[in-house]
Image (spheres, rainbow, N blue to C red):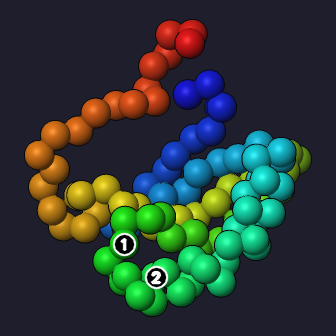
Amino acid sequence: GRSGAFLFPSADGRLVVKTLRLDRFTDEVTSLLKCSSELATHFEKYPTSLISRFYGLYSMKLYGKKIFFVVMGNISAAARGAKPLLSYDIKGSWIGR
């Protein structure tokens, strides 16, 4: 998409790794810190919630360049063992928007 982010599923499909730009990484950290206790309470109360679970925000140096990424749960039907009825590609356009 326009953000330039890449999404990588884990081998078993249960997790997704999404790359972030530095400004988005900072925004994600700030947002998650603000609502972390509320999210934990929500997931305890609603263990089957479809809100994405964030497992970590990371940075690493690769080929001399620092990259940032988030690891989160995959909420797609396939990751939950269900077959989707319909699916849509919402963000996959290569045409300028």
Q: State the CA–CA distance, disc 1 to disc 2.
A: 7 Å
Find residue 80 and report its horizontal and vertical position in percent: 25, 67
Asked if the residue at tag 2 contacts the one at tag 1, i.e. Cβ–Cβ closer than 8 Å, the answer is: yes
Question: Is residue 11 among the parts visible in the rendering?
Answer: no
In the image: residue 31, left or right of residue 55: right
Q: Is residue 93 left or right of residue 27?
A: left
Q: Quadrant of residue 12?
A: bottom left
x and y, in percent, of residue 13 in the image: 35, 62
Residue at the (65%, 84%) spot, across then down: 37
N-terminal-most mark, 1 or 2 = 2
One can see residue 83 in this view: yes
Residue in front for this viewpoint, 40 or 53: 40
93, above or below 67, in the image: above
| Left or right relative to 63: residue 41 | left
Q: Is residue 74 above or below residue 3?
A: below
The amino acid type of the residue labelled 1 equals Ser
Q: Position of residue 6 (x, y in %)?
A: 57, 41
Q: Secondary structure at mark 2?
A: helix
Residue beneath disc 1 = 49
